Image (spheres, coloured by chain):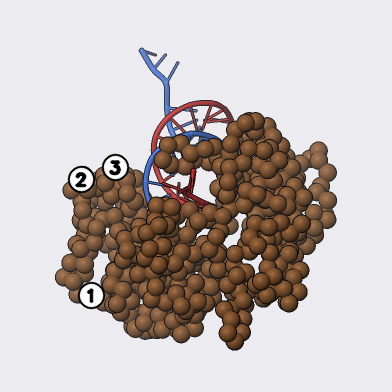
Chain colours: A brown, B blue, C red
Amino acid sequence: MFALIDANHFYVACERVFNPRLEGRPVVVLSNNDGCVVARSPEAKAFGIPMGAPWFLWRDRARRHRIVALSSNYALYADLSARLMAVLGSFSPRQEVYSIDECFLDVAGLAVNPTAYGHAMRQRVARGLGLPVCVGIGASKTLAKLANHVAKQDPTGPGVYDFGAQAPAIHDAQLAALDIGAVWGIGPRWAAQLHQRGLHTARDLRDADPKTLRQAFGVVLERIVWELRGVACLPLDTLPTPKQQIIASRTFGRPVDALEELQAAVAQHVARAATRLRRQGSQAQALQVLLRSPRDGAHLAPLPITGMQRLATPTTDTAELTQVATRIVAEQYQPGRRYHGAGVMLLDLTPVGSAPRDLFRAAPPPRTAARMAVLDQINARWGQGTLRLAREGFLQPWAMRQNHRSPAYTTDWNALPVVRAGHEPARSKRSTTSRVPPETRIASPPSQGDPTRSPPPGSTPL
DNA sequence: TCTGGGGTCCTAGGACCC
DNA sequence: TCTGGGGTCCTAGGACCC
């Protein structure tokens, strides 16, 4: 028996925890560069704003209807996510953290009524964190996912749906009321093809012949059929497995045509990717640079993979990886061309120390590990980019736009809400200074927390 | 007249997830 | 003018091994 717990409009809910005035109002959270909508409060959904909507198409309407738009604040969401997972993890010895706002729990054999247990989870999360969640329960992960979908359909409902608690006729009717595309693992392509075969609902899919579907679609779809029948095929992944590849990429805040700026941006992505590489205890033996050209018609051109470079020996060293990436950029660079985004992929990842060393190359200097450890400690304490290679540059005019970001309430002392009599909280103005590199904010003595003395947005601290 | 059987590794492409 | 940024798994086919 599995439970899937999923936060409702998670990013919006996180913002509301620290800004209760957003409660009851239509609120959306935007992707990086304030490009499109990635989270909507129920009030915003009521205006018909779709998930993923390009924000520039909605900005005017939003202003008229006083819809609040916020840039995404991942430091805040990641911190609340960790707390959410800790609370939910206390409900079962076996937990799979599936994404930033949802997890599976194994609730088999727990000598409790699963439905009541689900209500207890909701209450504990609401009391401890102020976040709304829904709980779905079923005999397989796919059924738990679907049950969660049912629980979310009725925002004023109990927030818990347990397929195991329903009489067979009700269970059947519920599956028949769900579109086949609502089933976890059925994307738009497969949904269209299944509709053509006369399969329209979750019940149709459950009752279809697994072998026939396997021939046409592969083993993945066959497993979904069995899962819908209550035969658990997908195991609970309780240990986060190390990533097989690490990508760091961004669209630029404005197009870039200078080689040095391109290299600086890529260097910054290498730094982020390498930090994640070391955090999971891996080393990389190959690196690819991604450069994005101007858009192609209505859509962003994909990030084309340019020159992959294999390394003689696997490494965790930001400087070494940056050197390779910088050279690839120089090789691929076309003068006069405008670039809209860039990124880096680290590949061929293995646990540190697992790969044999190159017979003809000296062992890596032992101080590399120590140097990287210091780098990571400083940046973990003071913010990513506090200590960095000069190659990353200082002005970073390509940096992404984030015009509506809320403060880092839980991870930055300077961003703690401070309410003074007769004043707005001091933080409200600081949120517009996101272009000021962290070292400036950290260096600021508390007296400079006065918003009237904050540097204006876009000003250079150097 | 008659020409096996069992593998691995790599890549590209297609689907899906949040 | 303006449309994100991560990931996973599966399959098929080709090259190669003994």
* Direction bottom: furthest residue: A421
Mark nearer the N terminus (2 vs 1): 1
- Residue A197 is labelled as 2
Residue A405, horizontal then vertical, whole percent: 55, 65
Q: Quadrant of the C terminus of chain A?
A: bottom right
Residue A35, horizontal then vertical, whole percent: 48, 53
Q: Where does label 3 land, which residue?
A: A216
Disc 2 from disc 1: Cα separation: 29 Å
Nearer to me, A208 or A462: A462
Mark nearer the N terminus (1 vs 3): 1
Q: Secondary structure at mark 3?
A: helix
Circles 3 and 2 on the same subunit: yes
Residue A313, horizontal then vertical, whole percent: 73, 43
State the residue at coordinates (59%, 87%).
A421
Disc 1 from disc 3: Cα separation: 32 Å
Nearer to me, A154 or A286: A154
Q: Quadrant of the N terminus of chain A?
A: bottom left
Mark 1 vs 3: CB contact within 8 A: no
Mark 3 vs 2: CB contact within 8 A: no
Check the residue under mark 3 and report the chain it is in.
A
State the residue at coordinates (46%, 64%).
A69
Amino acid carrying mark 2 in the image? Arg
